[in-house]
Amino acid sequence: MHLTFPTSRCSKFICYSKYMSKVIVGMSGGVDSSVTAYLLKETGYEVEGVSFILWEARKRRDFTACCSLDALAGAAETAKSIGIRHSAVDVRDEFVGKVIEPFVDSYLHGYTPNPCILCNRHIKFPYLLKEADVRGADFIATGHYARTVREEGLEKVFLKKGKDPGKDQSYVLYLLRPDELKRLVLPLGDYRKEEVRQIARSLHLKAADRPESQEICFIGDGDYCTFIEALVPSAANPGPVMDAGEGKIIGTHKGLHRYTLGQRKGLGISSLEPHYVMRIDTENNALIVGKRDEAMVREISVTDINWLTLPHAGLLRATVKVRSMMRDRPATIKMTDRGVTIVFDEPAWTPSPGQSAVFYSEDRVLGGGIISAVR
């Protein structure tokens, strides 16, 4: 079946025709990567789709998960319908070692990891580039809602927020290396989600109305706690819940991996006032909780920094996002030998060590890193 689409619909995607060539699209089987592949093909690129076989793809058939068997089959079907080549690449061993094991280890050490960022950093983008090199492609592309803005030809590339504030995914892309960013094309950055779904519906793609995946892709039922306990049974060892203000035991937790900073529900304590997780003490297997005002922080430390734009001074004014779906907040960034210290203008709801802090200048991503401590 030959599919066509009005050229005007592709006008939002700014193209550099003199650089048009082959692009490898990471296809998960979802609506975003499907429409990405279509828009690039309609724009004039030679497009080839690649899907990655991840750990749980061996036994999952849940189509809402990006690494499921059905999702891979859906990606292949979509590629055929829009007239592009498609193949799957087995990266299961790498995924276990670089995503799943660090994910579990982080929780066991009191951190809250972001598996999507781990996957982007160690799997998705490095292997897309590898496949691009093998297949003679100049560019790679994904269905992320963010923008790559090129200046001076292809020599200078900036990463910016997507135009749809409700779907902006620049937060999970801050760790891109210069060689990845230089070769990355993001067609959906100028689109809103509903526009993308409308395009998919007009093409009669099965992914058009596929629900958003809200779970960790490699965990079948979304229960990461049970997943971790199956691998490390000792993770479920109970311990004391301690009141930060009074320093006394007020309950018993069910395993520190079940909690994250700022959490209120599921603490298993009885109190006249709500309590929130303030600190996870892995050395003493203790959960430290306090009242809401005690859970607000003004300063955080960030390590493992990746700068997309190198700062020119030791102090930098920016806005900082500490969770993917929260707005970025004004702050001062202080450079140190060990990383950076971020001081928010106003106290912020406690971020979780292990998550990422991403720095912005208006809609442009300056860089980011991993939160190591909160104060």
Image (cartoon, rainbow, N blue to C red):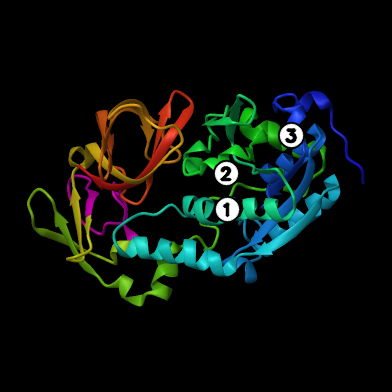
Q: Earlier in the sequence, mark 3 or mark 2?
A: 2
User: Circle 2 is placed at which residue position?
Assistant: 180
Question: Dots 2 and 1: beta carbons under 8 Å?
Answer: yes
In the image, residue 284 lies at what x, y percent?
A: 17, 66
x and y percentages locating residue 87 in the rendered image: 75, 59
Q: Which residue is mark 3?
A: 198
Q: Nearer the viewer, residue 188 or 246?
A: 188
Q: Which residue is mark 1?
A: 126
In front of the other: 271 or 103 = 103
**Residue 307 image position (x, y, % from top left):** 42, 38
Residue, x 83% and y 45% (percent of image)? 82
Quadrant location of the C terminus in the rendered image? top left
Q: Are marks 3 and 2 in contact (CB under 8 Å)?
A: no
Q: What is the CA distance from the residue labelled 3 to the residue labelled 2? A: 30 Å
Of labels 3 and 1, earlier in sequence is: 1
Asked if residue 116 lies left or right of residue 262, the reply is right
Please indicate whether residue 308 sits to the left or right of residue 93 in the image. left
Mark 1 secondary-structure assignment? helix
Who comes first in sequence, dot 2 or dot 1? 1
What is the spatial separation of the Cα atoms under label 2 and label 1, in whole angstroms? 8 Å
From mark 3 to mark 1, how far is it between C-alphas? 31 Å
**Which amino acid lies under the numbered mark 2 shown in the image of this protein?**
Glu
Q: Is residue 274 magenta?
A: yes
- Amino acid carrying mark 3 in the image: Gln
Q: In the rendered image, which quarter is residue 157 located in? A: top right
In the depicted structure, whether residue 213 falls above or below residue 6: below
Q: Main secondary structure of the magenta part?
A: loop
Give the magenta part as a residue range.
258-279
Label 2: which secondary element? helix
Q: Amino acid at mark 1?
A: Pro
The residue sitting at 62% across, 60% down in the picture is 67
Which one is closest to the eye, mark 3 or mark 2? 2
